[in-house]
Image (cartoon, rainbow, N blue to C red):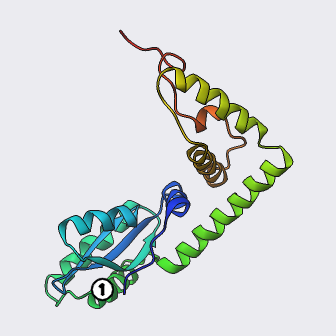
Amino acid sequence: MALKLPRAAEREYLAIYGIVAIYVAALPSGNALVSFSRDLLHSLLALRRRYSGAHITCAYWVKDKAEARLIVRQVNADLVFLDATAKTAQRCIENVAAHMNIPITEHSLVLSRARTAVAFIEDRIAEAQASGELSWFNSAYRAWRLEAKQIGRGMSYTEARARLRQNIFRQILTNEVQINPTQIFPPLPGIDFSVSG
């Protein structure tokens, strides 16, 4: 069975949070592949370019790339001697993580937490928009868009809102005090930095 993967804002949240997924992919041959990724959707698309019909069957999340690499290296070493089906690989990940004393979190729990965080942020943004507290953002977006238009750049309001959401995620996760519009909109050559001739 294919795994439900994070989409759009959930992917943004997980990327900013910095956790890493260890995943099992079922290949058309019946074998399994075990690897790690910060972005499961991107990894699945890359896999499907190599193995048409491949799908991710399970994933576990760990705190960083170093832990993920340790587990994946050992799992792949152990699977050399086994019939590497997706179920075998999944059990092997669980056993290796337990043996290494590295906590792993089920994908469904991480996805649920990401959805809750995204919904919370979206609600706060909607409330701020309704109360007029987001006027600074709308003004900053308008000003950036006018400057960017002069040099042939652009950004949709949807993309600008996504950038705002990402910055709010970052603010919450790093305990920053306030969001600066220069952190949201990309710098413009000649305006935010000089253009060398």
Kindly identify the residue that appears in the image at 57 percent across and 35 percent down: 185
Element type where label 1 sits in the image: helix
Above or below, 167 against 182 in this view is below
> Which quadrant, please, contains the N terminus?
bottom left
Q: Is residue 20 visible?
A: yes
> Residue 130, position in %: x, y?
82, 51
* Name of the residue lying farthest toward the right: 131
What is the tally of numbered marks visible in this picture?
A: 1
Q: Quadrant of residue 46?
A: bottom left
The residue that label 1 is drawn on is 92
Q: Does 190 sit left or right of 27 as displayed?
A: right
> Residue 86, position in %: x, y?
28, 86
Type of residue at label 1?
Cys
Foreground of the two, 121 or 74: 121
Q: Quadrant of residue 180?
A: top right
Q: Is residue 106 visible?
A: no
> Residue 79, position in %: x, y?
19, 83
Foreground of the two, 183 or 127: 127
Kindly identify the residue that appears in the image at 35 percent across and 74 percent down: 23
Kindly identify the residue that appears in the image at 25 percent across and 76 percent down: 54
Kindly identify the residue that appears in the image at 38 percent across and 12 percent down: 196
Q: Quadrant of residue 127?
A: bottom right
Callout 1 crowding tier (Cα within 10 Å): few <14, some 14–19, many ≥20: many
Above or below, 188 against 125 in this view is above
> Which quadrant, please, contains the C terminus?
top left
> Residue 128, position in %: x, y?
79, 50
Q: Does 127 sit left or right of 196 as displayed?
A: right
